[in-house]
Image (tube, helix red, strand yellow):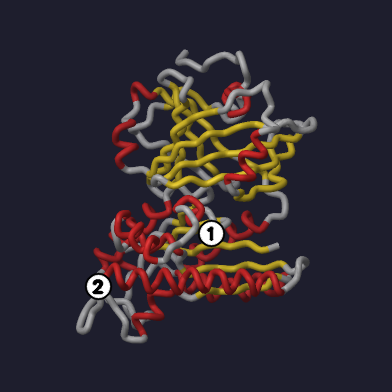
Amino acid sequence: MVKRIVLTGGPGTGKTTVLDKLKTVYEPQGYRVIIIDETATYFILKGIKPFGENAIDLVDFQELVMRMQLAKEEIFDRAAEMMGEDAKVIIVYDRGAVDNCAYISQEQFEDVMARLNHVKSFADLLNQYDAVIDLVGRKDFYTLENNAARSEDADYALELGANTLKSWLGHSKIKIVLPKDTMDEKVNEVLNIFNEVLAEKQVKRQDKYSVDLSKTDLDGIIRNSRAMQIEQTYLKSEPNVEKRIRRILINNSESYHFSVYKIMEDGTRVIVSEKSIDKKDYDQLMEYKDDNYETIRKNRYCFSDNGTYFNLDVFENMEDVGILEINVLENEKVRIPDYITVMEDVSKNRDYYNKSIARKNGKELKKA
């Protein structure tokens, strides 16, 4: 088992403290913990930097960061393979490849990827990690003392933190950790998230709400979100098992995914397998489409508000009704933003399950 987890956030948010704690917590439990240091800091400490005296061009700098980042990821993935199939390995990245988007525009990021002749799409690059944990900073806690490569003032550090989170919008498993009164509280919340990601059997638990799109600031959500187009197809499978494939278009790049869930008696789904596949595999799996279900087509808008990560799905065949999804931790309290008009909690209403919406001749969900 190998889990790849990104720890990200703006400067001065406590990443170093959290990283120092991980080995002491998980190695005694039999995990092999590999910490991948921040790549940009390495270059800056070596005198290669995009600011100050003898600075190099910012996009050129990001090219160097990306080259080393991707090389490190490939090398340590290979190292994890060498540890054997039975090894429990956690690879923790102090920032991942997509963090570079916080410092340059999307067009510049695509230019960097073109220079590298990188074969992965942006969507694949985004979702190659099992989870992304974003640490949010607080101005009064900011310091320059624990990182010689840091030069930002507190206000700019907070701005970079916000841009960093925006870079990761669209990833399927983002967890946001808000500022706490003590660092111990922040570390404990991160550890709880790690425990959830490391669980051998993860229950697909979501809070779901039907949304009145005609009374919701959809334009505002679109402006502040990352949009993706999803085509979701259900495959023939045995009873109490759900198999589906997805084609996802994000930032003009495609990715393909295959998921298998076990359906429990109470309707909850336990993840059996989730993996990225290539287009050839996707096309082959399409031959096993369950003809009792239509392919779902929807626009998904991924955004954050007050420390919570939201997905708003707008379906091709649903008039004025969207579905708001929130992946939650146990006992997590969530506040729905005022600019979203919720009609009802549909978390346990099977009519609002994607598979129910996909059922041929099924009723179209409309406003009550």
Q: Quadrant of residue 83?
A: bottom right
Q: Amino acid at mark 2?
A: Asp
Q: Position of residue 35 (x, y in %)?
A: 55, 74
Q: Position of residue 150 (x, y in %)?
A: 32, 77
Write the residue at 28% across / 59% down: 159
Kindly state the secondary structure of the residue where label 1 is placed: helix
Residue 59 vertical placement versus 204 (above, below): below
Q: In the depicted view, which residue is nearer to us: 283 or 105?
A: 283
Q: Amino acid at mark 1?
A: Glu
Q: In the depicted view, which residue is nearer to us: 104 or 311?
A: 104
Give neighbour class at mark 2: few <14, some 14-19, many 20+ (Cα, 10 Å): few
Q: CA distance from mark 2 to mark 1?
A: 38 Å
Q: On the picture, is 254 further left or further right than 32? A: left
Write the residue at 30% across / 33% down: 219
Q: Which residue is mark 1?
A: 189
Q: Is residue 66 visible?
A: yes
Write the residue at 37% across / 80% down: 43
Q: Could you say which disc has been placed on residue 57 in the image?
A: 2
